[in-house]
Image: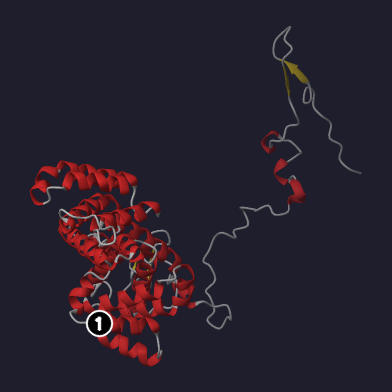
Amino acid sequence: MGKVHNPSEGEHETKVKEEGSARRNITRKNTEPSAGAHFDSRNKKQGGAGKGKWDPLDGADQGDLPVLDKNDPLYDEEEAEGKYILSSGEAPDTYANGNPTGFDDVAEKAVYGPMLTLPEFKIRVADALREYWDAADADEVVRGVEEMRCRAFHPEVVKRAISLSLDKGPRERELTSRLLTCLHPTPLADEDMEQGFTLLLDSLEDLVIDIPDAKTMIGSYLARAVVDEVLPPAFLSNRNNSNPGDEVVEKAVGLLSREHCNARMEHVWGPGDGRPVAELKEVMDQLLEEYLLSRELDEAARCVREMDAPHFHHELLKRGVRIAMEKDGMDHADAASSALDAMAALFSFLVKNAIVSEYQVAKGISRLSKLMPDMKLDVPAAPGMLAEFEEMA
């Protein structure tokens, strides 16, 4: 017969702390073993009948872990030795010397191979190029490429720099050509440059979809790289042998075959490449003289666009009107041969096609008015000719 527990007096009694108070202290079953209680809450089942409850007294967290068996199919030698190699791809021969590329602070392990993945590297390079085109600090780009420690991805620098500059202006393309010179031979070796241009040429079909003139510009990049001794001339011949009839390579060879090609390649990107003002003025004079000879508005407009100097168009107007006045002199009645009429037609065409702003035209005329006392010495009819130009333009 089971043992019956007889509660002692006052064991389950409700106690009132003080007389006339509603507060009560309810004493529950005594669960302390030291007090002689018959109920131990430590053995009580928790939610889910105690499943999943860790018993700290079973000793499972003590003692040495079992040694991994080398014959086990799941045996991992690197895990057994505690050494991990973090890499985004196969390590090239340059890492075969056993020296780590860097140290991962998170994993606290040495890293062998590139420190970044290829997508991360491309993003970093693109950001560095945008900053370079704003500040023109090539040393900062060189330092950034070295700090990324991704020698396996160095050819991507060449491809990325050129492909991003194709939809930029002449200034950015000139800066990109100079950057390639600064990157060679350190940190980008000869092999990196050749592989980078090879990647660029292989991706040409995709670039042409967005940039129709991509073949012409990449051909200019190739010729400029050969002149700057960034690429060996043998690269073009080898590429021509492996891909006969390559339009880009033929374009580069044609540029290098011209007379005084070295001097021409220095200004391959046109007058808007950030050259000094004095050289820009010489280009303007040459453009205006050729226009007065040919009278081709479309060709002159194309040359004005290539200058990529919209803030300096007032100088173009000033020089154009002055040249026209000097050519016409006293007599400009014949509209068919009048240089002033041709110049007025040119600037009317440029303003109509939004190549030159009306503000720049007004500024150029204002500058001419200030120079009128000196111009009258050479062309006495200059004031009347300027007034006539304003009416026509």
Q: Position of residue 86 (x, y in %)?
A: 43, 70
Residue at the image position 17 percent from the left and 79 percent from the top: 260
Query: Quick check: can you spot residue 187?
Result: yes
Residue at the image position 15 percent from the left and 53 percent from the top: 330
Query: Quick check: can you spot residue 229?
Result: no
Image quarter hosting the N terminus:
top right
**Direction from residue 298 to residue 311 in the image, left or right:** left
Q: Amino acid at mark 1?
A: Leu
| Image quadrant in which you'd find residue 256 | bottom left
Q: Give the structural element (helix, strand or loop) at label 1.
A: helix
Q: Nearer the viewer, residue 156 or 331?
A: 331
Residue with the most extreme left position: 377
Q: Nearer the viewer, residue 374 or 221?
A: 374
Residue with the most extreme right position: 1
Residue at the image position 75 percent from the left and 29 percent from the top: 28
Q: Position of residue 192 (x, y in %)?
A: 32, 78
Q: Nearer the viewer, residue 367 or 117?
A: 367
- Look at mark 1 in the image and give the residue it sits on: 256
Q: Tell me if residue 393 comes above or below residue 92 in the rendering.
A: above
| Image quadrant in which you'd find residue 44 | top right
Q: Position of residue 292 (x, y in %)?
A: 25, 63
Q: Position of residue 160 (x, y in %)?
A: 38, 68
**Direction from residue 16 to residue 339 in the image, left or right:** left
Q: Nearer the viewer, residue 391 or 183?
A: 391
**Direction from residue 239 to residue 227 in the image, left or right:** left
Q: Tell me if residue 101 comes above or below residue 347 in the rendering.
A: below
Q: Tell me if residue 28 comes above or below residue 186 in the rendering.
A: above
Alpha-carbon neighbours of circle 1 within 10 Å: few (<14), some, or many (≥20)?
many
Q: Tell me if residue 208 comes above or below residue 16 in the rendering.
A: below
| Image quadrant in which you'd find residue 295 | bottom left
Residue at the image position 76 percent from the left and 50 percent from the top: 48
